[in-house]
Image (cartoon, rainbow, N blue to C red):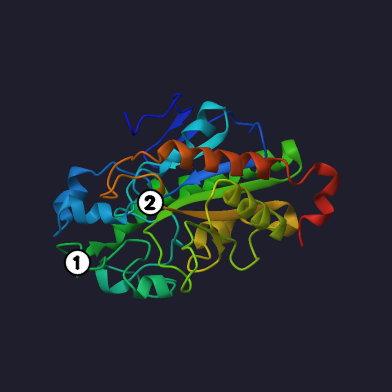
Amino acid sequence: MANSAPRPPVEMTPAFHRFGPDIPISPVIISVPHAGRAYSDALLGAARVSLAVLRRLEDRWVDCLAHDLIASGSSVMIAQAPRACIDLNRHEREIDPVMITGIPPGAPLQASIKLRGGLGLIPRRVPGANELWRALLPWSEVQRRIALIHRPYHAALTRLMQAAREAHGHAILIDLHSMPPLPPAAAGRAAAQLVLGDRFGRSASARLMTLAADVAAGHGVVAAQNHPYPGDHLIERHGRPAHAMHALQLEVDRSLYLDAALDGPGPGLAVARAMITAIAGALAQELPRASIALAAE
């Protein structure tokens, strides 16, 4: 089946399935935060839109791109809760007060451009759907989702990153996402089919970004850097290059691995999967322990 992984997870929670040993076999950790497809009856009942609309928030089947890495024993975390429930790539205070009831006085909420566009910690709307939910969401429910899903996911990533650094001298997080096809950047130029993000140099060594782009080019894929997707909360939180903790976001064009409707796995899946596997393998070899002093450039 398209959504089956090649070996069973070593840890299963409502927030994620984790694959690979507690001590990672390489410095590279894979995170797939927007692949969750476990829609509860309660979530569907609260929605004023169809399941098809909620699924537009997913990075459709992007977890399939990590299956070869799972098979090789790499450390991979795949979200189970859907993005419609809670967005793991947002700060836990990135909450839209307009859609919440019972917010305590003085609660430290955090504004952002994504939140104003309807895509905060709890998504409020998507293009073509003005409001996703029938009623205001109780503050207590927001806190329940944070405690059950958001915090455990990030805590597990932190543990893996620290374990990788202790074992290998450094850690590299690949945060795997997918995107709709992009238009060409200019007339006569091919559109980028992979966007690498490092928060404009804040979350990873430039050496890693350059290497990932070179590997993609070797697979016939044009890569852009930080435009239009520089990465968000997840790599900002876990990327600390000065402390040998690097984090990159990879946005993969869905047309590379999905069918013509961009809904299910397509004929290009194996090729796209091989590219992601090659990028992870190259990054794992790029910062040997003796060169850690150079990793904070």
Q: Which mark is residue 129?
A: 1
**Please, is residue 183 above or below residue 20 in the view?**
below
Looking at the figure, which quarter contains the C terminus?
Answer: bottom right
Q: Nearer the viewer, residue 58 or 254?
A: 254
- Secondary structure beneath label 2: helix
Q: Amino acid at mark 2?
A: Arg
Image-based side of 178 in relation to 128, left or right: right
Near mark 2 (Cα within 10 A), the count class, few <14, some 14-19 or many ≥20, is many
Residue 247 is situated, as x and y percent measured from the top left of the image, at 61, 54
- When asked about the image quadrant of residue 184, the answer is bottom left
Q: At numbered mark 1, what does the secondary structure look like: helix, strand or loop?
A: loop
For image coordinates 57% across by 28% down, the residue present is 73
Q: Is residue 160 visible?
A: no
Q: In the displayed orientation, state which residue is furthest to the right.
A: 290
Mark 1: which amino acid?
Ala
- Where does residue 132 sit, x and y in percent of width and height? 20, 63
Comparing 31 with 262, the one in front is 262
